[in-house]
Image (cartoon, rainbow, N blue to C red):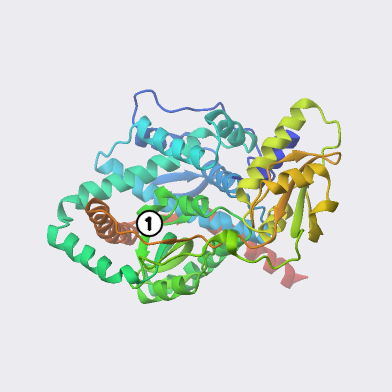
Amino acid sequence: MSCAFALALASGLPADGAGKRPAPAEAGSPPGGDEVSAAAAQASLHSADGVAAIVNDSLISDYDLRQRVALFLATSGVRPGEDAMKEIRDQVLKQLETERMELLEAQKNNTTVSASEVDKQIDGIIGDNHLSMDQLKGLLSHAGVQMATLRAQIAAQIAWAKTVQDQFGDRVNVSKDEVDAQLGRMAQGANKPHFLVSEIFLSVDTPEQDAKVLKDAQELETQLQQGAPFPSVARQFSQNPTAAQGGDIGVVQQGQLSQALDDALMKMRPGEVSPPIRSAGGYYILALRERQEAMGTKLPDPATQQSTTPAGTLPLARVLLPIGPKPPQALLENAIKAAGVVRQRITTCASAAEIVKQMHGAQFFDLGVMRISELSEAMQTEIKNAGPGETTQPFQSAAGIELIVRCDKAPPRVSVFQMPSRDEVENQLFEEKMSVFSRQYLRDLRRDADIESKYADAVSKAAGEVKADGESQ
């Protein structure tokens, strides 16, 4: 969830850089209607508001592009500079072009998506971010983003998955022998590490695209390192079907993925994000959420791990939303909510510092190693309820609303591998095969598509004019 949103909640102002003009009247789900048709209607509604791209005679308006950029900024918390903003617009436009191809193909095949299917995905998003539906709508409204923009994106992802399923589902057969063989490999590999992984995949369709796709992937990695939530970035930009689940590919064992991806995972610690990795079909960015050790491994008790600081001390950092000692009740409540949103995104003291950099008015203090007995009573109370590497609940002080971050290392998210069920293995094999067909299908659509990017042309023309002006002076 967005840091820009967090401060918008506290200040009552819209998030910076998002929604420069007020959003039109809010559109909800089409009652009893098809979300694919609604997404197509949303796409054509603002065609008079400038054209960003044309995909097979279907217009992507400048309004569509602004809305999706604002949606990404709102859900990622990224506050880019001018150059980074151009890269983000380029990435968002490319994804919009891909989605439009997918949406047109879905319509061609009479694929439909119900409102309840989209509602289910939205319920998952608000659950993951500990929000209510009213809070989500309020956050989007503050950023100038229509709910219809979020629904259209989700509908396009669902429609594409269903289209691929309709086209290739009968070709994908996971036999009993395949499940048995996979279970056998897993049993043999039970003494190997396993990894709970999420992915972002960017396709390279021709050798000429490689450098540009790598640059795009590196920009996404930068945004992730600056604190953008991995699931939000995956939903916006990943080109594998796992995008709909925030990039989640589940548990894989050592040696299951390609050599390049496997080598990267073996070097990663839980919570880390990889740089772009070139593998089959394009570039991958991996997030290691948890490492599972070999079956039967006895894990050390975190409570027995020795502290690296003297007794009675802890390395701490402080995040402050400076609203003063006696703010109006509404401001106080909104600031507490905002701090709660920020708390969900903090993973380390370093990440807290990066997050605060993206927030208007918030302050970050590296307190170093502090003697707990010398802190205020309120701080001591909150710190007692926070474990290593964790952040306290928001609390009020004379300065405003505060969070205290413990900078001692949290125990690594390590568990012991457990064999999956037959159904789980069968589903994973099916999804792997469908992902291959999905990439091939999309590559064929791109090869045959007629795409004209007006935004890119305008940027190139403007750059040329600036260069010409500079040379004439």
- Given residues 112 and 124, the one toward you in this image is 124
Q: Residues within 10 Å of mark 1 (few under 14, many from 20)?
A: few
Q: Amino acid at mark 1?
A: Gly
Q: Residue at x 49, y 74 (%)?
A: 267
Most foreground residue, 466 or 102: 102
Q: Residue at x 53, y 46 (%)?
A: 65
Q: Quadrant of residue 350?
A: bottom right
Give 142 or 136, whichever is nearer the viewer: 136
Q: Can you see residue 256?
A: no
Question: Residue 58 or 277: which is nearer the viewer?
Answer: 277
Which of the image's four quarters has the C terminus? bottom right
- Residue 469 rendering spot, x and y as whole percentages: 72, 66
Q: On the rendered image, what quadrant is the N terminus found in? A: top right
- Circle 1 sits on which residue? 250
Q: Report x, y in % for residue 409.
A: 63, 63
- In percent of width and height, residue 372 lies at 79, 54
User: Which residue, as the protein is rendered here, is positioned at the far top?
Assistant: 31
* Residue at left offset 73%, top offset 66%: 309
Residue 11 shows in the view: yes
Task: Name the side, left or right, on which 382 lies relative to 156.
Answer: right
Quarter location, residue 185 = bottom left
Query: How many tags in the picture?
Result: 1
- In the image, residue 94 sits, relative to residue 40, either above or below, namely below
Helix, strand or loop at disc 1? Answer: strand
Q: On the picture, is 415 further left or further right than 165?
A: right
Q: Quadrant of residue 321?
A: top right
